[in-house]
Image: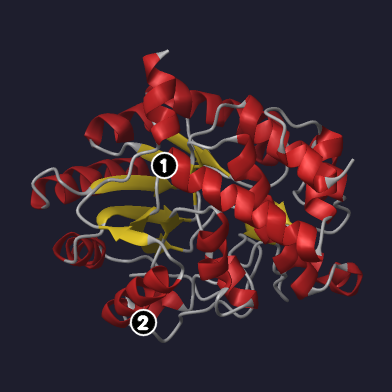
Amino acid sequence: MEVKTILGKQEFSKTDLVALLDCRDTTEAELFRHSRQLRDATIGKGVHMRGLIEISNVCIKDCLYCGIRKSNSQAQRYELTDKEIVEAAIFAYRNRYGSVVLQGGERHDPAFILRIERLVREIKHLSNQRLGITLSLGEQTEDTYRRWFDAGAHRYLLRIETSNESLYRKIHPAGQLHDFHTRLECIRSLQRCGYQTGTGVMIGLPFQTTGDLADDLLFLKSMDIDMVGMGPYLEHRDTPLWRYREALPSQQERLRLGLHMVSCLRLLMPDINIAATTALQAIDPEGREKALEIGANVIMPNITPLGNRGNYRLYENKPGMDEGAEESTRRLMESVKQSGCEIQLDTWGDSLHFQNRVKK
């Protein structure tokens, strides 16, 4: 079926999505134009900033693709102090970001859970309740999610990485700590707690097919997700998946697929928030801007203190390692304007999909 015919549909099958993911040249331009127009008509041209604070690279997980996995003895472990985290958050508040993301390795110990609860309350207090808070701290019990929500966090990102259970098992160690169904249930727990719930996938993994990516898109829709952060898989030399690097699609192909996934997801879910991720920028310096041009509406400038930013290395060639928070903010604002979008300041930038979902 021709791409033009597919784009005229209201609902998309797996076959339709595979065709859209595979299209190139003039049909690709048509896909991108369609997704951008749909974004503009549904949620407007506004782009929301989330100041990213990478609070720690200490992690109990051993995911086979991740540079901060527990077994990576080469990783230089760190934890930001409470003062560093709060100062970064207040920088975001004073620079009118509207929201911050506290991201870090997964931990379940009581001291960690209490610390996050306390930090969330302090950030809310010092920003006069005006700074939105997203958490991305892995799998937790529903009680922990609820404690953090009650403290003032209102968005949570927990990436599924792939909706293909067989592929999920290939990129994670065996055992309950890395169980696929636990991850799924955590996403449902977040929704029950009242969070705007986000997830995402890696694109271009070893063993992954275009059909898998189409299924990922349909999975996101079936889970009624409010926000998505997804990007190309980028290998890290100190991980088990590094040995498959020669079998991977080229980085340019992973970039192409990443942009197509953003575009296709916008067609499937017109009212959600979609991040223009740093992984796109790692391949192409203008990767994030290209995602904004075709339907993404969230960017996450890194405001982690420079002294530790290089240690939060999930993959090779992480961009922005030497760029201060002020310079990063300035450059992003300029690039957003060049993409034809408009930065939205002093706003949480909540997902319209979430607002519609809770009304049901």
Measured from the top left, where is residue 77 in percent x and y? 48, 70
Identified at 49% across, 24% down, the residue is: 189
Give the numbered dot on residue 307.
2
Residue type beneath disc 1: Ile
Query: Does 104 appear above or below 173?
Result: below
Q: Nearer the viewer, residue 289 or 45?
A: 45
Considering the numbered disc 2 on the image, is that residue within a helix, a strand or a loop?
A: helix
Identified at 31% across, 32% down, the residue is: 149
Query: Does 134 appear above or below 359?
Result: below
Identified at 36% across, 80% down, the residue is: 306
Q: Nearer the viewer, residue 106 or 285?
A: 285
- Residue 214 position by quadrant: top right
Query: Does 256 appear above or below 13?
Result: below
Give the numbered dot on residue 43.
1
Task: Pick the quarter of the image with the C terminus.
Answer: top left
Task: Pick the quarter of the image with the N terminus.
Answer: top right
Q: In the rendered structure, which disc, 2 or 1, sits on the residue that comes first in sequence?
A: 1
**Camera-nearest label, 2 or 1:** 1
Mark 2 crowdedness (10 Å alpha carbons): few <14, some 14-19, many ≥20: few
Q: Nearer the viewer, residue 77 or 198?
A: 198
Residue type beneath disc 2: Gly
Disc 2 and disc 1: Cα gap in Å?
A: 37 Å
